[in-house]
Image (spheres, rainbow, N blue to C red):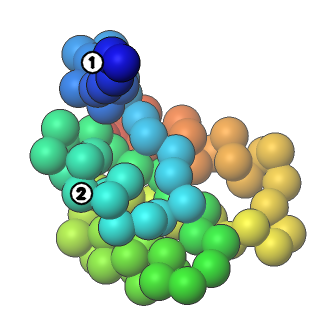
Amino acid sequence: MLIYFVDFLGHPKIRLFMTHGGLLSIQEAVYHGVPLLTIPLFADQDLNALKAEKAGFSLTLEINGLTEVMLDEKIQQVLREPR
């Protein structure tokens, strides 16, 4: 049996990673230097998102009340200012 692993975040054209804020997702993004847009859903994800934002490599959106305009603004902000 062959198992293939595709390293999406390691691709040079990746400019942003939208994630729920799970620890492994954040670790992989940090390893590859990819800025994050975090939308935490439950468990430790709120704390992970807060720490990532304080460290300067993520912006966070809350799922409650999220609009298309809010999402677009944050995406554009990350793409303009990839910290």
Q: In which quarter of the image is residue 56?
A: bottom left
> Residue at (24%, 16%) from the top-left corner?
12
> Residue at (24%, 57%) from the top-left corner?
27
Amino acid type at image mark 1: His
How far apart are the two marked residues, 1 and 2, measured between alpha carbons? Answer: 16 Å
Q: Is residue 6 visible?
A: no
The residue carrying mark 1 is 11
N-terminal of the pair, mark 1 or mark 2, is 1
**x and y, in percent, of residue 20 in the image:** 55, 60
Q: Quadrant of residue 67?
A: bottom right
Labels 1 & 2 near each other (Cβ < 8 A): no
> Residue at (72%, 53%) from the top-left corner?
70
The N terminus lies in quadrant: top left
Residue, far left:
31
The residue carrying mark 2 is 27
Amino acid type at image mark 2: Gln
> Residue at (34%, 67%) from the top-left corner?
23
**x and y, in percent, of residue 76 in the image:** 54, 36
Q: Can residue 56 be seen in this view?
A: yes
**x and y, in percent, of residue 55 in the image:** 22, 70
Work out whether residue 33 or residue 79 is closer to the camera in this orientation and state it: 33
